[in-house]
Image: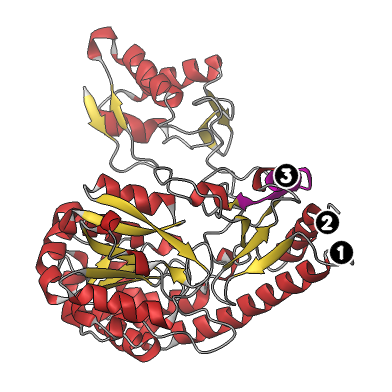
């Protein structure tokens, strides 16, 4: 007989085979649940009386099964503490469930395993500075005041409360021209780009270098990706009228702060991109860290110049953290219905409690306060990075330059080919216990390599916590002080 544990300490499906006898069948079911990890090491089992009632067995049958598994070493019976799964039981390498997480993530921003003590790879903000208390207060207010339909199925575009808050915030801080009806909430910029690739299809120009996962998502959605070179003035939009891009109807750019080169799109190129898009084409503006400009006021969103031909994508991943899984798309009218329908078929809607919390977080201006504090903290970190690299542990700077504008959570350290290659720097850094990411892995593998591709290391100065950052910089300086 197969029963569900419905009132016990744990929920577990047990398939007790009556053909082998009730006691033997229960022993086998418990043994299998332990071996395949459904009953983790350290889990306390229900009392023999409770389990007997739940499964419709005699208490003596359950006691005999427990005793047998204790004798085999699968269970441990301690007077006053009940019966628990033995610490060495369960799937190989399975940690006891009562061991608390150390708080240190096992995976870095890129999703690769963390191997070394120091990590300056780009991808996330300082997760230790997530505004836990303010977020909890916002969540409490949002849930307490939420209508009942928050807990049901809703509009694929997202909760109107968040869309209203975003329309006001984006207009005030980034110059975006929109209203709540033209915003679609998605589960990260990655999903937004995948939906666009699915709806727009055809030829899509994407900056090169750029985030490989984003490029892969657009290709997987059915679009043909054409690499668009980037230099110190941003994307080479002057190439778009050329033959190579004749089938391109969409271009994806990071005009405020290019990733990973760090440049901002030159005003002349912004204007050229606007003129190119006016001829019935679309620009997708990835404004992933537009709030973080340190040397001047942030450049306004490109969307404000050409709202009818621009898709604006913003995200909470850099201001709060990727785990929030909330991003937003501001769409021109022709794309609103098809993107909404694509979102409906993808996952129906992004989760709503987080949306309600973020809406409350924004309207209470806690979000503004958090962004301002983060901007100051990251500006100081970039300044410290530039200062430390300027002297290279007391030696004159040589063999590298710090590229890009003073913005965002990353900086490109350009390497002179005559000094040391990217791979050599990454390997040398590992010797000092430091994880680094070279620029080489961010180029489009399908694009023809050119001799003028810069060599560099993309330094993520945002992700280490305050205590770890100076030590990571020490390791970086030692890495680059080869002369």
Residues under labels 1 and 3: Cα distance? 18 Å
Residue at x 11% of width, y 63% of height: 338
SS state under label 1 = loop
- Residue visible at 53% across and 24% down? 92
Task: Name the side, left or right, on which 38 lies relative to 202.
Answer: right
> Circle 3 — which element?
helix
On residue 135, which mark appears? none
Q: Quadrant of the C terminus?
A: bottom right
- Please tell me the numbered disc located at residue 430: 3
Residue 372 sits above or below residue 250 on the image: below
User: What residue is pinned by disc 2?
Assistant: 481
* Residue that mark 1 sits on: 393
Look at the image and tell me in which quarter the N terminus lies.
top left
SS state under label 2? loop
Q: Write the start and end of the magenta stretch as one range.
A: 425-437
Is residue 115 positioned above or below 149 on the image?
above
Which marked residue is nearer to the observer: mark 1 or mark 3? Answer: 1
Q: Position of residue 12 (x, y in %)?
A: 33, 35
Q: Which of the pair 438/233 is nearer the observer?
A: 233
Specify which label sits upstream in the sequence, 1 or 3.
1
Seen in the image, is 138 located left or right of residue 97?
Answer: left
Position of 333 relative to 23 (above/below)? below
């Amino acid at each position: 007989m197969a029963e569900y544990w419905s009132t016990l300490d744990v929920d577990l499906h047990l398939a007790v085979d009556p053909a082998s006898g009730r006691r033997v069948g229960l022993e086998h079911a418990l043994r299998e649940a332990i071996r395949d990890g459904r009953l983790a090491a350290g889990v306390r089992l229900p009392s023999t009386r409770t389990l007997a009632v739940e499964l419709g067995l005699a208490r003596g049958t359950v006691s005999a099964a427990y005793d047998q598994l204790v004798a085999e070493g699968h269970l441990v019976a301690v007077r006053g503490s009940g019966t628990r799964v033995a610490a060495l039981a369960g799937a190989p390498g399975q940690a006891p469930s009562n061991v608390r997480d150390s708080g240190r993530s096992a995976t870095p921003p890129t999703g690769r395993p963390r191997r070394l003590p120091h990590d300056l790879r780009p991808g996330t903000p300082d997760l230790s500075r997530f505004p836990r208390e303010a977020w909890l207060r916002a969540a409490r207010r949002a849930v307490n005041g939420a209508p009942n339909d928050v807990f049901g199925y809703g509009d694929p575009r997202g909760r109107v409360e968040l869309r209203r808050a975003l329309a006001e915030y984006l207009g005030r801080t980034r110059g975006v021209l929109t209203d709540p009806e033209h915003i679609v909430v998605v589960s990260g910029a990655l999903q937004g780009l995948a939906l666009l690739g699915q709806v727009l299809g055809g030829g899509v120009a994407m900056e090169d270098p750029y985030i490989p996962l984003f490029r892969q998502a657009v290709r997987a959605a059915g679009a043909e990706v054409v690499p668009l070179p980037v230099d110190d003035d941003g994307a080479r939009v002057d190439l778009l009228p050329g033959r190579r891009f004749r089938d391109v109807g969409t271009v994806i750019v990071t005009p405020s702060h290019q990733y990973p080169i760090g440049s901002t799109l030159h005003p002349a190129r912004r204007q050229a991109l606007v003129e190119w898009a006016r001829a019935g084409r679309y620009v997708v503006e990835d404004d992933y860290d537009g709030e973080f400009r340190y040397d001047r006021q942030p450049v306004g969103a490109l969307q404000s110049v050409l709202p009818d031909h621009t898709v604006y994508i913003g995200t909470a991943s850099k201001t709060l953290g990727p785990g929030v899984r909330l991003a937003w798309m501001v769409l021109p009218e022709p794309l609103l219905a098809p993107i909404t329908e694509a979102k409906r078929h993808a996952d129906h809607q992004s989760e709503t409690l987080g949306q309600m919390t973020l809406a409350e977080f924004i309207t209470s201006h806690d979000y503004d306060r958090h962004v301002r504090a983060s901007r100051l903290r990251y500006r100081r970190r970039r300044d410290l990075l530039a200062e430390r690299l300027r002297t290279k542990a007391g030696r004159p700077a040589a063999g590298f330059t710090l590229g890009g504008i003073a913005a965002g959570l990353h900086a490109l350290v350009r390497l002179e080919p005559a000094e040391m290659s990217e791979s050599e720097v990454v390997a040398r850094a590992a010797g000092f216990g430091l994880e680094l990411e070279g620029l080489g892995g961010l180029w489009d593998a399908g694009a023809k390599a050119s001799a003028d591709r810069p060599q560099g290391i993309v330094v993520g100065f945002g992700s280490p916590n305050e205590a770890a950052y100076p030590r990571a910089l020490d390791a970086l300086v030692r890495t680059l002080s080869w002369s």
